[in-house]
Amino acid sequence: MKRSIYFILMSLALAAAPGAAAPQRAFAAAPDQVRKMTYQEARQRLRPAELPAFWVGSVEDLPSRWAKLSAGHAREIARSPGGRPLHLVSYGERETVKHPANFNSAVGGRDPASYMDKAARRKPVVYFVGPVHGHEVEGLTGLVNLVQIMETGRDLRGKDQSALRSLGGQCRLLILPAGNPDGIARFEPRAIHGMPKDEFQFWGMGTWADDSIAFWPGSKRQHPRTGPEIGWMGCYFNDKGVNPMHDEFLAPMSTEAPAILRAAMDEGPDLAVSLHSHESRPAVLRPAYVPLEVQEQVRSLAERAYALLAGRRLPHGSLPEARPDTCKNMDSFNLVSALHHISGAAAFTFECPHDVADEKACRVTFDEILDIQLSVYEAMLRFAMDAKQKGASPAGQKSN
């Protein structure tokens, strides 16, 4: 907690020299795969959509959904480069507490509570950030269903979720369903479910100018993803080619990440998640460049989430390891890292399976995807409430 964010960012800059290790992620990349696909070919491969009624894979009707809210409140917090709104939906009244400093200065003053006296709040504040990668709509589906649950006590399947609604009512919920509406709007299939791996990579990462698919992680080696080297942009990015997960947080390149961070700075969440999707089993990922104590709390949360998933016969990955960040074992300082350093939140990434049609991928049904999402939300709410009952926020701020 005592290290300055500027010291951390300076370390990152020095570590970016040639020879630095590549970032790690929950599944291995395949940089040796060189396949070509044009946008027209990808569209021709699309099968007629047979998506369940509870599935949400687009942003077009989101404003009309928010206009019908009765229990919650929706407000626009930004516009994407493509002119699409980012809405923050909230439940539970905001509690006024002392807030004399920003988090970075409070840490410098050796008193994080000088940023915001979180321990004085009656309810924990939990922040859900929906997909910042446009093809990862599993989190969008989950959050729209969570809004429906908070409004009616049932999800969009009509399934009773009154217990989850009751948990949500004991917290202040901040729900940002779509973190990259430009990318989601570009995602024509509306779901990756059952898609072959090369098509999945095409829709996510796009192509280079010669129509070769830009497989991860090489797709991140040009940013913003614009210019003559780029073919079809892919859905990872907004209309300016910016990946909100890797915006330049001290000199923003676009609008989405600053709005996500501004909401966190203003509200001071105790717990925050950035919802993503991948090929593998559901996984809570280690937040990089945050104190080891926060990483250990995220690991404890992962234990709780995985226990819920296992009890419901749903898959899960391995527990994240709490470890220091070094130049030899490097991850990126990303949106999740920034969420902690601007608000003190115990922030983490959750990766949900898409159901990619590959023998090494985690295969799940649409219903299982929604159940995975809701189980993780439940684990988060219980974790935050337990911390509050012990007189602390999940990130460790204790009451006097």
Image (cartoon, rainbow, N blue to C red):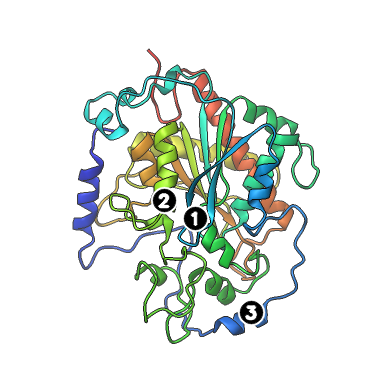
| Residue type, label 1 | Val
Q: Closer to the N terminus: mark 1 or mark 2?
A: 1
Quarter of the rendering containing residue 193: bottom right
| Residue type, label 2 | Ala
Q: Could you tell me which secondary element the residue under label 1 belongs to?
A: loop
Q: Are marks 1 and 3 in contact (CB under 8 Å)?
A: no
Q: Is residue 244 above or below residue 207?
A: above
| Residue matched to label 3 | 43
Residue 395 pos. (x, y %)? 41, 31
Q: Are marks 1 and 2 in contact (CB under 8 Å)?
A: yes
Question: As rendered, which of 105 and 193 lies closer to the eye?
Answer: 105
Q: Is residue 146 left or right of residue 268?
A: right
Residue at image x 51%, y 52%? 179
Residue at image x 60%, y 84%? 40
Q: Are marks 3 and 2 in contact (CB under 8 Å)?
A: no
| Residue type, label 3 | Arg
Tell me the tag on residue 257.
2
Q: Closer to the N terminus: mark 3 or mark 2?
A: 3
- Mark 1 to mark 2: distance in Å? 9 Å
| Residue matched to label 1 | 132
Residue at image x 71%, y 55%? 55
Graded by Cα atoms within 10 Å as few (under 14), some (14 to 19) or many (20 or more), the crowding at tag 2 reads many
